[in-house]
Image: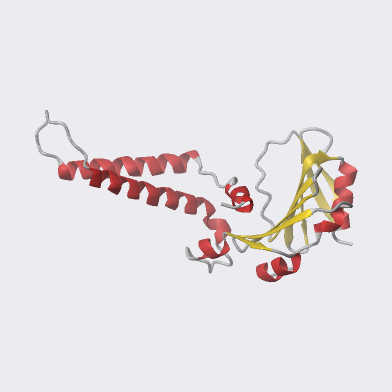
Amino acid sequence: MSEKYNEVMEHVQLTAEARERILDRIENAGKTTQGKNGSGNAGAEKIISLRNWRRYGAIAACLILMGVLAVLWPSLKKSGEKGPTDVASYWAEEYDSLEKLSKGIGFPVEDISVLSADKAEMYYLNIAGEIAHVKLENGHQMIVFRKSKGSEDNSGDYNSYTNIREQQAAGAAVTLKSMDDKVALALWEKDGYFYSMSFEPEVFEEDALNDIAGIFQ
């Protein structure tokens, strides 16, 4: 798998309830199969054939896939029209330019390459047909920028930050998050889109706000 695919997969998580539900279904499927194949001798050992193990494996794989799809489904739907076949075609499509990403996802995506004075590696992804994902790496700084329609947080960052505050940049109210006085994550809404920008390592607040303003100039 590519680095970009692995990066997206890092944010696919099952809730505890989903895991319990999947395990219960697997266990119940096993009990049902054993009941059908039982010999009626209470003292005899039940021998599960290789064929049954293969059956259980197939059941487990299907149920796990169902659980993953249940978690991802809200992001995979687009205007209520997308179906299961969209998982393969829109899961994480890579482009070699910002222009192609903008065309592929259907809305203009800001150019964050202007934020690096040094030569930078740029990565462009269309996630689930919903989120434009752009990553900049220049050897000493990594910036991940995301844009999507609507007002839902698209960052994929579920850390519990201790320092959360609000500032203004590019005519928008920007929520800044970090564990200290610097900035690890910035979130804002503008003109019907939700934006997120993460910084690694963290940057000073002034630099983060200047970066946000810079991509809209």
Residue 43 to residue 188: above or below: above
Task: Tell me the quadrant of the picture where the C terminus can be found.
Answer: bottom right
Q: Is residue 64 at all visible to an observer of this figure?
A: yes
Its colouring scheme is secondary structure
Q: Position of residue 192 (x, y in %)?
A: 74, 63
Residue 151 to residue 9: above or below: below
In the figure, is residue 144 to the left or right of 12?
right
Q: Position of residue 151 (x, y in %)?
A: 69, 57
Residue 139 to residue 127: above or below: above
| Residue drawn at (51%, 50%) of the image | 71
Which quarter of the figure has residue 185?
top right
| Residue drawn at (67%, 38%) of the image | 159
Which quarter of the figure has residue 134?
bottom right
In the figure, is residue 146 to the left or right of 85?
right
> Which residue is nearer to you in this view: 168 or 49?
49
Q: Is residue 171 at all visible to an observer of this figure?
A: no
Q: Position of residue 169 (x, y in %)?
A: 87, 53
| Residue drawn at (86%, 61%) of the image | 216
Outermost residue toward the top in this view: 43
Counting every numbered tag in the picture gives 0
> Which residue is nearer to you in this view: 113 or 70?
113
> Which residue is nearer to you in this view: 31 or 103?
103
Q: Position of residue 136 (x, y in %)?
A: 77, 52
